[in-house]
Amino acid sequence: MRIELVMPSPPAKSGNGSRHESPPSGETAAGPPRRRAARGRIRVLLVGDQALFREAIHLLLEQQPDIDVVAEVASLTAGLPSAVVRKPDVVVTALSSGEVEEVSALKSLRNDCPGIGVVVLMGLDGAQTLSRVLSTGVRGVVLKSASSDLVVKAIRAVHAGETWVQREVVDTLASELRRLGSAADERDGSLLSQRETEVLTLLATGRSTAEISGSLFVAESTVRVHLLKILRKLGLRNRVEAVRHAIREGLVQL
């Protein structure tokens, strides 16, 4: 076991122009002392309204040789100023419901800090909630029931610029699209295969060919073949029409 000694900082002096920098509003002062992030390590900002949850994720990440937790906040609203000041590489946030307020806060974080990766931890709350979260542009989605190693994998993947969506999330969205597709009039009478449905699901949430390839663990050329089959079966001309079709069928909420 490694024991780290943290020496207390001397109190800020007054009257000589020196300044004592306070943490951004909303950051918690609870928990173990934060290590100064080393060069080359992944800087993580934790967001969650439950202190016990934040402590558990914090302890998990502190055991990783390449990750530093730079701050904790209780909400995405408080997380935005902290993200600006702390400049994390990845924000790990736990959603309580995936309702409009949380989705709006996610969009604000992505718009105001586009260089920061976001990993969302959430429950399997249905296809519409999942699609709303994915439509914000977050690149990492992990279920709260996932094992700790999946959380770490998602953080590393998002930091590397990749997309990491847990398989169960894709399966849920694909099942919903299949249900909607079976109820809709098929132009040529052919239903999409399971893999084609998965590709269309990810395409509808803004994923590129390379990102779909990474999420489904198939070659980019295979993704392109599936896209061509989707367009042919649905009688569509291009990807834009495919996305519109998915939106019209209720897969993605805008």
Image (cartoon, rainbow, N blue to C red):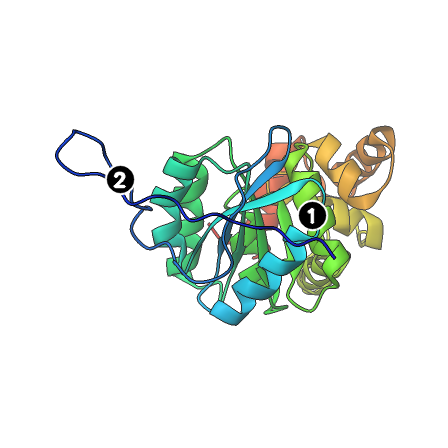
User: Residue 92's mark?
Assistant: none
Residue 225 lies, in percent from the top left, at: 85, 33
Residue at screen point 64% across, 43% down: 67
Res 158 quadrant in image? top right
Circle 1: residue type: Ala
Residue 94 lies, in percent from the top left, at: 53, 61
The quadrant of the picture occupied by the N terminus is: bottom right
Q: 199 or 98: which is nearer to us?
A: 98
Residue receiving disc 2: 20
Q: 170 or 143: which is nearer to us?
A: 143
How far, Cα to Cα, is label 2 from label 1? 36 Å
Q: 49 or 125: which is nearer to us?
A: 49
**From what the image shows, is residue 236 above or below residue 55?**
above
Res 244 quadrant in image? top right
Residue at screen point 76% across, 56% down: 149
User: Residue 154's mark?
Assistant: 1
First in sequence, mark 2 or 1: give its number.
2
Q: Is residue 83 left or right of residue 146?
A: left
Total of numbered circles in the picture? Answer: 2
Circle 2: residue type: His
Residue 165 lies, in percent from the top left, at: 70, 50
Q: 193 or 146: which is nearer to us?
A: 146
Residue 136 lies, in percent from the top left, at: 50, 45
Q: Nearer the viewer, mark 2 or mark 1?
A: 2
Circle 1: is it few (<14), some (14-19), or many (20+) Cα within 10 Å? many
Q: Is residue 57 left or right of residue 15?
A: right
Residue at screen point 42% across, 41% down: 83
